[in-house]
Amino acid sequence: MNFEVKKQILDKIEQYDRIFLFRHVRNDGDCVGATKGMKSIITATWPQKEVYIIDTSLAAYLEFMGPEDEEVADELYADALGIVLDTASEARISNKKYTLCKELIKIDHHIPLETYGDIVWVEEERSSCCEMVVDFYRTFADKLVLNQEGATHLYTGMVTDSGRFKYEGVTGETMRCAGTLLDVGVDTDLLFARLYLEAFEYLKFKAHLYQKMQITENGVAYIIVDKEMQEQFNLTLEQASACVGTLDSIRGCIAWMIFVENGDEQDSFRVRLRSRFMHVNPIAEKYRGGGHACACGATVYGRAEIAALLADTDALVKEYKETNEGWL
Ligand code: AMP
């Protein structure tokens, strides 16, 4: 699929001696895995090329994926190729110096609300952007080199963005891509331990969430992780935001979300929305956000807007339940 655009991307990578890789703000396993995996493929294939990932530090749970490159002089961007991975809109590109690159490529699997870049390869049905990078490798396997380090980065992104190969977007092609990585060699025991073991204290916080979680009339489960709760359990914003999965297995709650209080003057809350069977992205898009059909993010201001977003989602769930069968 999309052979032509992949060939154009390969040609551009071959053409440039210096390449910068970019990803989205609030990094996650997929955007980090995709940038690091792509870097690994390029440097293993063409050792003489300069490839940089210059970005903010990694989320704490991803620190094992290694350090980023040191900042370089702005002039170096001018004759370089930029590749932005896993990022739907320009506003969400983390390192704003992407504008300095001579040419820009977008590789992404989010719903495209806008576009950017000279070459655009978007497949929104893909379970992760890492899957696209593996597909790129598989398409040109006679030319490209993938080593264990690259395979591990890409597998990390595939595992995290697909909920350990559980979500809707997982296909036979996903598994074939994952199989390619396992054939190269990934220490899955170590990787799963690094990703999913939790601190004793964090489980205490989860127990608290189970006490506090609420459900709207038609079955939207939610929790407001306010500043008080964050302080009580000594949580960073990142740790407070990581608990959305706590609500993912309640029978009848086909949509769920958390509201994490940022503690700023605007009284803003980060919203992380999730669903099964039905799609919640229209809600995220209404409240300044976006993402995927069943996993998206938004920002709301004040308690009144939390109530409005919940009411909108509740109405969507009601309509879905009334017009569809087979949901659980
Ligand atoms: P999160 O809950 O932050 O993990 O977001 C789920 C998915 O939605 C990820 O793929 C994010 O990149 C995307 N996303 C989150 N927030 C936004 C936003 N404000 N605008 C567009 N996409 C978003």
Image (tube, rainbow, N blue to C red):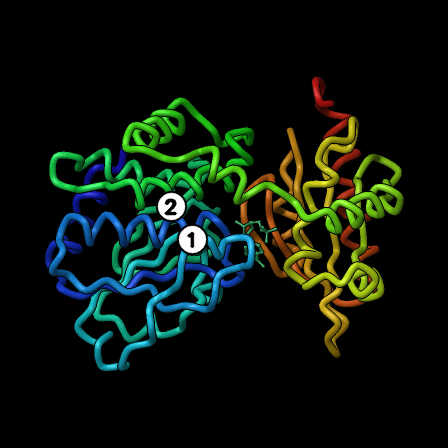
Q: Secondary structure at mark 1?
A: helix
Q: Secondary structure at mark 2?
A: helix
Residue 70: x %, y % from top left: 33, 73
Provide the residue designation for mark 1: 65
Asked which quadrant contains residue 147, the reply is top left
Q: Residues within 10 Å of mark 1 (few under 14, many from 20)?
A: some
Tag 1: residue type?
A: Met
Residue 22: horizontal and vertical position, in percent? 36, 62
User: Image point 46% across, 69% down: which residue?
Assistant: 56
Q: Is residue 270 above or below residue 177?
A: below
Placement of the C terminus among the 4 image quadrants: top right
Question: x, y percentage for residue 275?
Answer: 66, 37
Residue drawn at 24 percent across, 74 percent down: 77
Of residues 46 and 108, which is closer to you in this image? 46
- Where the N terminus falls, by quadrant? top left
Q: Residue at x 38, y 46 (%)?
A: 153
Which residue in the protein does label 2 denote? 153
Residue 44, percent from left and from top: 18, 49
In the image, 266: left or right of 169? right
Sequence-wise, the earlier of marks 1 and 2 is 1
Badge 2: residue crowd in 10 Å (few <14, some 14–19, many ≥20):
many
164 shown above or below 39: above
Q: Residue at x 78, y 31 (%)?
A: 250
Tell me the quarter of the picture where residue 262 sits.
bottom right
> Does the numbered disc 1 mark a residue whose Cβ is under 8 Å from ligand 1?
no
Residue 20: mark: none
In this rendered view, identify the residue nearer to me: 186 or 139.
186
**Type of the residue with mark 2:** His
Q: Disc 2, ligand 1: is the CB inside 8 Å?
A: no
